[in-house]
């Protein structure tokens, strides 16, 4: 019942969106990455240990060794109601871990999803793991609001000087939101590799799976044209999409923009900001793996 209503809602808003599988409509925001850097790479970021790992793979969060404040906004297909905002604060600790709190909101008054998360990642040598507890609230006009806890777990490793591995699962506890048709929050899994021949180039590839539905394959590349200027592009299937992005870093600020396409719908726009609190963390230990994120 819930899936059918979600699907109908998206169809009313976007025409061709009604062709989406019901569970995919519900899981849309969860399956995709967060932050314009992720979107510019077609969300192939399961190996990336930047501050946005608090959303994209908590197992890679420990590589982030600077305290940071994050904010992102995106609008899907230029359709009213298909927008989301995300914000988070991350803080590294002397013992090698990084923690953070996050907030995600998608939708409008008709349907919205709000997720508040508490995350912690830890690394030893070239290996890192992390967990996040999510308080998920789903609200559908006329049917009320339901809240559940969804747990996630991830890991990341530097296999060689140039090769990285990452894996992540969201809602591994398979939280149920309705007894009718055994409706549950989607369980999402992804795993991938990253090849980084030097500090200027990163090439990512990964697979993502919403249980019971077709596997999504995505790939992306990031190239630093200048030390502070990065260009990005990526592709994915199910459906076939392309993405393009740019990132600019200046002192404590990181500004990213991305444009993603869809075969039937209008383009989507994404922008994100990161402010890094550099004061007071100069003496924190940074490993080679930290620096390469």
Image (cartoon, grey):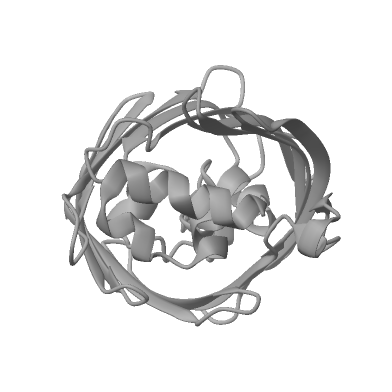
Q: Nearer the viewer, residue 179 or 254?
A: 179
Horizontal arrangement in the rendering, residue 180 relative to residue 158 (left or right): right
Horizontal arrangement in the rendering, residue 187 relative to residue 71 (left or right): right
Location of residue 220 by image quarter = bottom left
Which residue is found at the position 40% from the left and 48% from the top?
Answer: 10
Residue 94 in view, yes or no:
no
Q: Quadrant of the N terminus?
A: bottom right
Which residue is found at the position 82% from the left and 41% from the top?
Answer: 148
x, y percent for residue 135: 78, 36
x, y percent for residue 99: 73, 36
Horizontal arrangement in the rendering, residue 183 relative to residue 228 (left or right): right
Q: Nearer the viewer, residue 87 or 140?
A: 140
Horizontal arrangement in the rendering, residue 165 relative to residue 147 (left or right): left
Q: Nearer the viewer, residue 203 or 23?
A: 23
x, y percent for residue 38: 39, 53
x, y percent for residue 236: 32, 73
């Amino acid at each position: 019942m819930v899936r059918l209503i979600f699907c109908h809602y998206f169809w009313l808003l976007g025409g061709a969106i009604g062709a989406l599988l019901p569970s995919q409509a519900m899981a849309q925001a969860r399956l995709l990455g967060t932050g314009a850097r992720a979107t510019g790479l077609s969300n192939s970021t399961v190996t990336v240990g930047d501050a946005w790992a608090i959303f994209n793979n908590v197992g890679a969060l420990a590589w982030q060794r600077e305290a940071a404040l994050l904010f992102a906004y995106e609008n899907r297909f230029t359709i009213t109601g298909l927008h989301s905002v995300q914000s988070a604060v991350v803080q590294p600790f002397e013992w090698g871990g990084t923690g953070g709190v996050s907030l995600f909101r998608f939708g409008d008054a008709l349907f919205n999803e709000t997720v508040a998360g508490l995350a912690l990642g830890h690394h030893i040598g070239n290996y890192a793991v992390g967990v996040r507890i999510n308080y998920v609230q789903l609200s559908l006009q006329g049917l009320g609001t339901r809240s559940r806890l969804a747990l996630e777990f991830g890991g990341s490793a530097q296999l060689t000087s140039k090769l990285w591995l990452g894996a992540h699962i969201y809602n591994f506890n398979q939280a149920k939101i309705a007894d009718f048709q055994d409706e549950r929050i989607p369980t999402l899994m992804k795993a991938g590799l990253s090849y980084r021949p030097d500090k200027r180039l990163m090439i990512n590839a990964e697979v993502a799976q919403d249980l019971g539905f077709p596997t999504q394959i995505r790939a992306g590349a990031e190239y630093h044209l200048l030390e502070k200027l990065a260009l990005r592009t990526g592709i994915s299937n199910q459906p076939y999409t392309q993405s393009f992005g740019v990132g600019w870093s200046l002192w404590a600020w990181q500004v990213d923009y991305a444009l993603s396409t869809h075969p039937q719908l209008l383009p989507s726009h994404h922008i994100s900001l990161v402010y890094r609190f550099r004061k007071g963390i100069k003496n924190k230990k940074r490993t080679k793996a930290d620096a390469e994120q």
